[in-house]
Amino acid sequence: MTTITTDYLVIGAGALGMAFADTLLAETGAHITIVDRHARPGGHWNDAYPFVALHQPSATYGVASRALGSGTIDAHGPNAGLYELATGPEVTAYFNAVMQQHFLPSGRVTYHPMSTYEGDGRIVSILSGKETRVQVRKRLVDATFIGTVVPSTQRPAFKVAQGVELVPPNALPALWMHESPAPRPFVVIGAGKTSMDTIVFLLQAGASPDDIIWVKPRETWLWNRKHTQPGMEFFVQTLGGFTTMLEAAATARTAEEIFLTLEREGIFLRVDPSVRADMFHYPTISEGEVALLRRVKNVLRKGHVREITRHGLVFDAGVHEIGGNPIYVNCTATAFTRRAPEPVFSDNRILLQMVRVPNVVLSGAMAAWVEAHGKDDAEKNRLCPAVPFPDRMEDWPATLLGNLMSEGAALSHPALMAWQNACRLNPAGKLVSLVPEDDAEKQAILARVSAAIMPAIANLQKLVKQVG
Ligand SMILES: Cc1cc2nc3c(=O)[nH]c(=O)nc-3n(C[C@H](O)[C@H](O)[C@H](O)COP(=O)(O)OP(=O)(O)OC[C@H]3O[C@@H](n4cnc5c(N)ncnc54)[C@H](O)[C@@H]3O)c2cc1C
């Protein structure tokens, strides 16, 4: 057994842990030890399906010190006209470069890949079984809270009979090796963004929409990517969208009213607007992708799948027969584990969580900045309040309120605001600080934001109480 000492021991080299370590390195002289089960940094991106891409622009993802992508606006495909989205392999290559070209050469980071943190300062190598004891001088940093799960690493929650072909989306690009006859139909199980990525992939790779059956236990609200863009050329769409959100939040009598107002303004979308949506995990999508998804007409809304047999799908209400030579694609993993927020800073621990939903990476970087410059844990927790992540539509007012309170807390600290406004992971702050005084259209939007904030906070508090 080896014993080492370090200032901070970070568990998890996913986006959250990497963004935290990067800013801590920049803002302090601390030594950091990072441990992760995966062979390379990037967390779940290592397990994702090969056709995965960021849902949001590369321009605001990753760590604060290094740009991801080239800031190109896509000229082709369903994301045309919007900032580029890094593919999964680009994301993992990026985090690997951050580790190999920045963290390790600094001489202040020690990295334990393919190792498990077992608690009590014990790191165990998965390959050798060797144990390392870590003495932590400052804090243990837990970067595993968000609990991202992808289909390739999770068993399905339903039974699968022998002989049924059930695959994660990862298997689809390898179908050229499938023994004949080629499988058809494609039965895509799941209602979240993974199922949407899978269907867009199948259609773009040549599948007929008639050969796709989409099994949707729930319907989700979607955020129109057009309204999440970072550049000044998108100011009116992005900040204007946020303003509309605040104004709707200030007057709505229910959470659903906010969603419906945003849908009328084109800021939120539903694949099928005739079906009530009750889920919201911040999936971000382009209108081009939604147009493709609407080509699939075979949509099964019979609740959750309980079992797949040789004959078809078993729901609580009975069996739905599937003919042909089907391949079932499991897209049922949820990207976030539902947990109630906890204080980020306590005793010798930092429990990284989202302090701006859904911005995972800004949240990690901000916690590091606050750890470096905050006075004590009371101030640090005030500047970095954990914000709950929504599951259902009714949960969203609490998230919106949490984001506004978190932004308000940062406003009270000029040095934190200055850092936040300069940080590449925070698109809105930068845009707002750069608006020229004589730009009447943009200044009018900023004035609407100022007018709507306090009424939005007051009304959101009422909506949160309604849910209890
Ligand atoms: C398909 C998909 C697309 C997404 N697109 C976006 C996007 O565009 N923008 C965005 O902001 N977010 C996006 N997300 C959300 C995404 O989850 C976050 O951006 C981010 O990658 C989460 O990182 P994380 O570090 O919290 O979790 P993870 O990536 O899960 O990393 C946690 C790490 O901790 C390690 N670990 C856990 N326990 C231990 C232990 N005991 N010992 C050692 N190691 C341990 C795990 O091995 C893992 O590597 C997307 C998610 C998915 C699934």
Image (cartoon, rainbow, N blue to C red):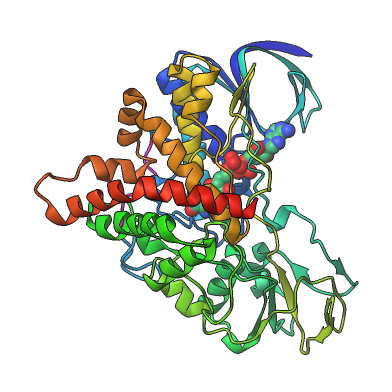
Most extreme residue toward the left, as rendered? Answer: 438
Q: Nearer the viewer, residue 1 or 71?
A: 71
Residue 271 x %, y %: 52, 76
Compared to 191, does 244 lie above or below?
above
Determine if residue 242 is in view.
Answer: yes
What residue span does the magenta drawing correspond to? Answer: 66-72
Compared to 95, does 451 lie above or below?
below
Q: Give the left or right position of residue 430, taking residue 214 as reference.
A: left
Residue 188 x %, y %: 67, 74
How many discs appear? 0
Does the segment drawn in magenta span residue 69?
Answer: yes
Does the segment drawn in magenta span residue 362?
Answer: no
Q: Give the left or right position of residue 296, taking residue 291 as reference.
A: right
Residue 411: image quadrant is top left
Q: Nearer the viewer, residue 11 or 468?
A: 468
Q: Is the magenta stretch mostly helix, strand or loop?
A: loop
Residue 115 x %, y %: 72, 31
Residue at the location (40% across, 54% down)? 57
Compared to 441, does 203 lie above or below?
below
